[in-house]
Amino acid sequence: MDTRIERWRRLAPAAELLTPAGKGPFPLVLLFHGCGGVRDHIRAYARAAVEAGWAALIVDSFEARGWSRRLAQFLICTGLMFRGRRRAGDVLAAIEGARALPLVDPGRLAVAGWSHGAWAIMDLWAQPLTQRGEVRIADADEGSLEGVRGAFLAYPYVGVASASRGGRPWPRGEGLKMLSIVPRRDHLASVRRHLRALASAVSAGAEVAIWSVDATHAFDEPGLKGRVLAYDDALSLEALDRFRAFLRSL
């Protein structure tokens, strides 16, 4: 089982850092991809963050482990392995690693996740972090979410095995500002289930905003043309605008 530092050392070589012009320090948003891995839309959001004056750190949980997109589609997208609570250790370790980056303002951090990545973020906030070994991190009890001001959650997975599925209050959340995108045609969760899961953050004192969209899960990923997953160009552009505005509000 990794310590926080050991996990970050595994993740760091595969991470991508984008920064605005200048010497910094910059506020930083950490981006956690969906179960399909780092796709073009994740990098588009990273560029949007830079346009908003933020540095962006794309954390690739799959490349760091040598996992292919094909493996991810068959084993992770289906929930057979690497569920949100386990990946939450990546989020905890990456936050710690990000604080130490020389160009980063450690007091102005945000996290952003898409589907599986949002699941990992929510599962991390749902853990007490009072015992060793939580979220598969040996020293999780010494971890901290200090400095994280906001969470951007794009169509989070809130179904079976999600720690927030039942709406139990998170152990922390006071002062956290959140924006969650809830697609009304999400095949993985009804609007009601999304709202029940987000109630976990509200009960903990987080400020939660919801953007309800008439779209499918992963509507902002170019190339999806099916009935279950379909790209929507106009809503994708609006999502980028809302992401920039959200970061500027933190």
Image (cartoon, rainbow, N blue to C red):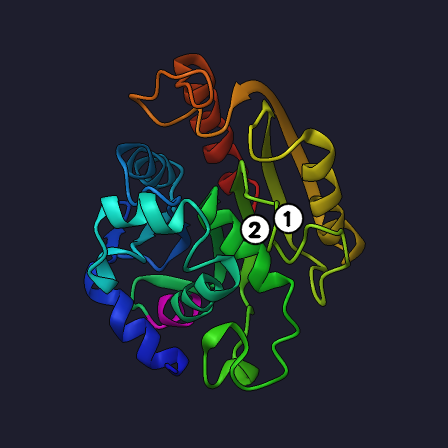
For the question of whether residue 240 can be seen, the reply is: yes
Determine the residue positioned at 37% across, 81% down: 2
Quadrant position of residue 169 = bottom right
Q: Earlier in the sequence, mark 1 or mark 2?
A: 2
How far across and down, in percent of the image, does residue 129 sit? 61, 77
Q: Quadrant of the N terminus?
A: bottom left
What residue is shown with label 2?
A: 150
- Identify which residue, 110 or 36, lies in the foreground: 36
Quick check: 146 left or right of 48? right
For the question of whether residue 21 can be seen, the reply is: no
**Mark 1: which amino acid?**
Lys
Q: What is the span of residues highlighted in magenta in the rendered image? A: 95-100
Residue 98 lies in the magenta stretch: yes
Judging from the image, what secondary structure is the residue with disc 1 in? strand
Alpha carbon of mark 1 to alpha carbon of mark 2: how far? 5 Å
Dominant secondary-structure state across the stretch colored magenta = helix
Quick check: 105 left or right of 107? left
